[in-house]
Amino acid sequence: MKPVCVLGNGQLGRMLRQAGEPLGIKVYPVGLDAEPAALPIAQSVITAEIERWPETALTRELARHPAFVNRDIFPRLADRLTQKQLLDQLGLATAPWQLLADRSEWPQVFSRLGALAIVKRRTGGYDGRGQWRLRADDTASLPAECYGECIVEQGINFSGEVSLVGARGEDGSTVFYPLTHNLHEEGILRTSVAFPQADAAQQQQAEAMLSAIMHALNYVGVMAMECFVTPEGLLINELAPRVHNSGHWTQNGASVSQFELHLRAVLGLPLPQPVVFAPSVMVNLIGTEVNLAWLQQPLVHLHWYDKAVRAGRKVGHLNLTDSDSSRLADALNALVPLLPPAYASGIAWAVAKL
């Protein structure tokens, strides 16, 4: 089997490497400053764990590589302007939006989009960074360099957030996991909950939308779609052309993880429908030191990224899966005293979902 080089050597690249080992697939996560000559690039399939990257010797080499899967799709989806334009072209539901080109546009923005405006940088902003929630008397706080470099969306009154992780093969076949329920705090994913059976209407709508996107782009691999739940149905918030934080539960809660599914897709291997056999919960570890007492809990699977711990930084996650929801809830509650107080609300949210 061909080796796979992953542009980016963060935790997603590491987890792709781990997923390749049982299949005998050699996966090489590579930093942007790596020397091309030191890597098996010529005979590899190329994928990425990041959507955008600077020009380096490595990225110049990869830009010419014939087996860089989705190479021309990454920049299109990394820019929120062209991402939103794609959704509009496909007629898919998303929050009303526009490019924010000049401060003189604010009266028209609030007239068209309503009292709450969500400003997002076109590129680079994630985990709550590069985003602003503004009302008419707040606009002076927006940095001047944002104009022309941001889009502005209508603030949506949603009842929940869900994501769909799916994959498309070279032959156009698609498979999907059940919808994942997500809790964000300050723009960062804190907790995810997934069930073997999702709401049928929501699952059908989400699969139709993500299928349309992947087919339109001729995309190959795993893609994630984040949505708001509204009374009128799902609204697409953002797309990620890669394995995704909200799919980490699949490592322990599905027959095939999102990481293995992505490798299968880019290598042209079979894509079976993943089997989800029990409710699962993922707890993101954010700026938190490792605590080996977590491992006293029999349902806990610790995934530690071995990164320097800093405030706001994702340093690992905990997966818990059990067919008995009450036992799963008990295991989650047992984690509360073993984690910083900020985690209690996210765990209570997950327990209430079960």
Image (cartoon, rainbow, N blue to C red):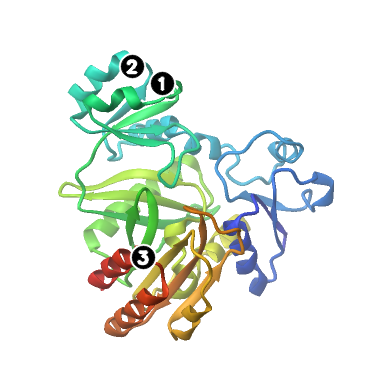
Q: Is residue 226 left or right of 117 when viewed as pictured?
A: right
Q: Is residue 158 visible?
A: yes
Q: Check if mark 1's residue and mark 2's residue have beta carbons within 8 Å.
A: yes
Figure quadrant of the N terminus: bottom right
Provide residue 92's location: percent of width, then percent of height: 30, 40
- Specify the amino acid type for callout 2: Arg
Q: Is residue 83 above or below residue 289?
A: above
Residue at mark 2 to residue at mark 3: CA–CA distance: 39 Å
Provide residue 193's location: percent of width, then percent of height: 34, 67
Looking at the rendering, which quadrant does residue 54 occupy?
top right
* SS of the residue under disc 1: loop
Provide residue 345's location: percent of width, then percent of height: 29, 64
Residue at mark 1 to residue at mark 2: CA–CA distance: 7 Å
The residue under label 2 is: 103
Q: Is residue 164 left or right of 124 when viewed as pictured?
A: left
Between circles 3 and 1, the one closer to the viewer is: 3
Q: Is residue 178 left or right of 25 when viewed as pictured?
A: left
The residue under label 1 is: 147
- Specify the amino acid type for callout 3: Tyr
Residue appearing at x 55%, y 52% in the figure: 170
Looking at the rendering, which quadrant does residue 28 occupy?
bottom right
Residue appearing at x 34%, y 54% in the figure: 184
Q: Is residue 323 above or below residue 58?
A: below
**Circle nearer the N terminus (2, 3):** 2
The residue under label 3 is: 343
Residue at mark 3 to residue at mark 1: CA–CA distance: 36 Å
**Circle nearer the N terminus (1, 2):** 2
* SS of the residue under disc 3: helix
